[in-house]
Amino acid sequence: MKKKILLVDDEIDLTLIMKYNLERTGRFEVRTESRGRDALATARAFLPDLIFLDIMMPDMPGDDVAALIEKDSVLAGTKYVFLTAAVTHREVNARHGDIGGKPFLAKPVNIQEMIAMIDTVIAY
């Protein structure tokens, strides 16, 4: 059974590339959302196993979206990973992908990093 992944990022081209690369593995069903404000409704309709959330989006920051997910009666407990260009790969690696108690990936992210993070986060 394919794992459902929701990508929330205002960089539409980036999400389309990530979606394509994840889906071509045959392991994932992927949906995308480009607006933080629409992410909750999309997640409620899709019920993903994991959500990748961009931290810096113009309409609503990813950490605000995460707070809404955690408080939502349907989505509470849904796992998420933050994506950000605000930290370097070196900073993320030095903290073993965990900053402030939450999993992070630094942008630009490659497909192998994403799959490794999915496998790690969903396993717990």
Image: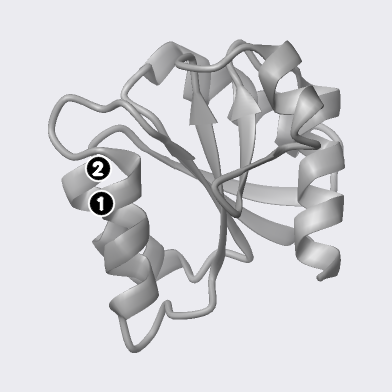
Q: Distance between the residues labelled 1 and 2?
A: 8 Å
Q: Residue at x 86, y 26 (%)?
A: 112
The residue where tag 1 is placed is 64
The disc label shown at residue 19, or none? none
Residue toward you, 25 or 86: 86
Instruction: Provide the secondary structure element on which disc 1 rests.
Output: helix
- Looking at the picture, does residue 20 appear above or below residue 60? above
Q: Residue at x 38, y 73 (%)?
A: 70
Give amino acid for label 2: Gly
Q: Where is residue 64 in the image (x, y as percent from the top left)?
A: 25, 51
The residue where tag 2 is placed is 36
Mark 1 and 2 residues: CB-CB less than 8 Å, in contact?
yes
Q: Position of residue 12 (x, y in %)?
A: 38, 19
Nearer the observer: mark 1 or 2; the answer is 1
Q: Residue at x 86, y 52 (%)?
A: 119
User: Which image quarter is the C terminus in?
Assistant: bottom right
Number of residues whose C-alpha sits closer than 10 Å to that of mark 2, classed few (under 14), some (14–19) or many (20 or more): many
Q: Which residue is drawn at 63% across and 66% down?
A: 49
Give amino acid for label 1: Asp
Q: Position of residue 77 (x, y in %)?
A: 53, 78
Instruction: Provide the secondary structure element on which disc 2 rests.
Output: helix
